[in-house]
Image: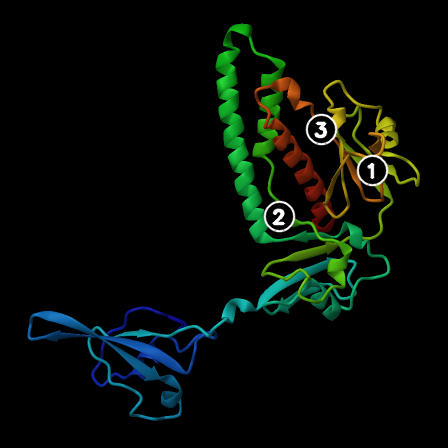
Amino acid sequence: GNVRAPGEYPLESGMRVSDLIRAGGNLSEEAYALKAELTRYSVTNNTGREIDIVNVDLDAIRRGDESADLLLREHDYLIINRIPEWDSTWTVSLEGEVQFPGKYRVRRGETLAEVLQRAGGLTDAAFPEGAVFLRETLKEQEQEQIETLSRRLEADLASLALQTANTGGSQTMTTGRVLLDQLRTTEAVGRLVIDTDSFSNAGSEGVEMRDGDRLLVPNQTQVVTVLGETQQNTSHLYQAGMSRNDYIDLCGGLTRRADKKLIYVVRANGAVVAGNRSRWFGRRKGTDIRPGDTIVVPLDTDRMRPLTFWGNVTQILYQAAIAVAAVQTFDN
């Protein structure tokens, strides 16, 4: 259990519970120092072994009560428990445009807004809409999804290779191999999309912190980035009134492989906004472009049937690239 050097120790004459605990390096920091459990084995009439559970009053032993400091027998097994909810205190990291950035210990149920309040809040130069919130459990889930898609894509390419063996290959095979290579080298980030209300909502609706969480708050940005199937992917200064298509035109327009019907925008906080149709007159509603947005022009995967799930692969690749770029500005 929770001693500094748990293990098996030789039984000496007159050895008591306190002696065994000292042999184990004494109690660890997280040990429950009030009670322990002693498992004791005894043989009855040479026919079998009985097990007795003995409660040990560690608090009394510590006070010098010799009657509580039991004499040990051969094969006794002492278990020192851990303090309940010892692991409920976690460490999180606040980085970037925070008044007092650094690592903070948080208790179970504490929200992001409460931790930010302890850290003095955001600076005047902060860009909360572009904050990046990272969580380890999400990173593990995303990595599993990436590995699953990699295996599925590899199997589909192997099947497609047999179908196209007599035709000398195809553009679909080439594109698929490129996507597979990119997917294999993609590392999950574990980003959780949060809105600006998360910085001030300290109630039950706030984002509860977990061990290892990171909040990265950038400074104000004035750029809009374009990724995907354009003639030249690049970033541009934000200009009020410019539309999604205006920024695409600044990149030289779409390539022949672009899927113009599925162009979407990734907000600075990681939320995805897809184009949709208005109920009035069937007109398409324009997506307003904001500073920090990324416009994504996906690959037209409908041309590569029956590999229809490739659209999911390209979306993961683009969004992972956006998240990685946001994190790298802090890690570099």
> What element does badge 1 sit on?
loop
Q: Which mark is residue 298?
A: 3
Of the residues under marks 2 and 3, which one precedes in the sequence?
Answer: 2
Q: Nearer the viewer, mark 3 or mark 1?
A: 1
Q: State the residue at coordinates (25%, 83%).
A: 15
Q: Residues within 10 Å of mark 1 (few under 14, many from 20)?
A: some
| Residue 234 to residue 138: above or below | above
| Residue 321 to residue 111: above or below | above
> What element does badge 3 sit on?
loop
Residue 74 at x, y percent in the picture: 19, 75
Of the residues under marks 3 and 1, which one precedes in the sequence?
Answer: 1
* 143 relative to 264 in the view: left or right: left
Q: Residues within 10 Å of mark 3 (few under 14, many from 20)?
A: many
Q: Which residue is mark 1?
A: 287
Where on the picture, by quarter, is residue 94? bottom right
Look at label 1 and name its amino acid.
Answer: Thr
Look at label 3 and name its amino acid.
Answer: Pro
**Farthest residue in the top direction?**
166
Q: Which residue is mark 2?
A: 190
In 3D space, how far apart are the residues under numbered discs 2 and 3 (Cα atoms)? 22 Å
In 3D space, how far apart are the residues under numbered discs 3 and 1 (Cα atoms)? 16 Å
Of the residues under marks 2 and 1, which one precedes in the sequence?
Answer: 2
- Is residue 229 visible to the viewer in this orientation of the structure? no
